[in-house]
Image (cartoon, rainbow, N blue to C red):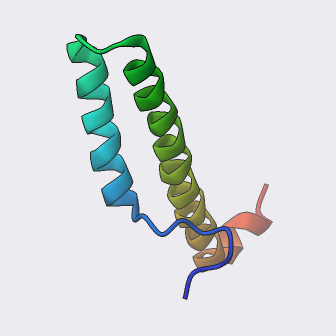
Amino acid sequence: MNAPDEPTTTYEQAREELADVVRRLEAGGLTLEESLTLWERGEELARVCQHWLDRARERLAAAAPGDAEEG
């Protein structure tokens, strides 16, 4: 079960949709409103991807506690 603030979209889904958003923005031909809507969606997807990357880093750090004690 997901934590309350955990996204329901997987990293892979968010990354794929984000790549599509970028392609659509780069292709142009959109109205300003369409571009802004896509940009906002891209920002949201980037936050989802960052969330999952941060969680992965936390899990890796927890799996190697001896490394965290050094330094």
Residue at image location 65% in from the left, 79% down from the top:
3
Q: Position of residue 15 (x, y in %)?
A: 34, 48
Residue at image location 23% in from the left, 26% down from the top:
23
On the picture, is 36 further left or further right than 29? right
The quarter in which the N terminus is drawn is: bottom right
Q: Nearer the viewer, residue 46 or 68?
A: 46
Which residue, as the protein is rendered here, is positioned at the far bottom? 1
Q: Nearer the viewer, residue 6 or 54?
A: 6
Residue at image location 63% in from the left, 66% down from the top:
58
Query: How many dots with numbers?
Result: 0
Question: Quadrant of the rendered structure where residue 33 is?
Answer: top left
The quarter in which the C terminus is drawn is: bottom right
Question: Quadrant of the rendered structure where residue 27 is?
Answer: top left
Q: Position of residue 37 (x, y in %)?
A: 45, 29
Name above or below for residue 62 compared with residue 11. Answer: below
Residue at image location 51% in from the left, 32% down from the top:
40
Name above or below for residue 35 compared with residue 12. Answer: above
Q: Position of residue 20 (x, y in %)?
A: 25, 37
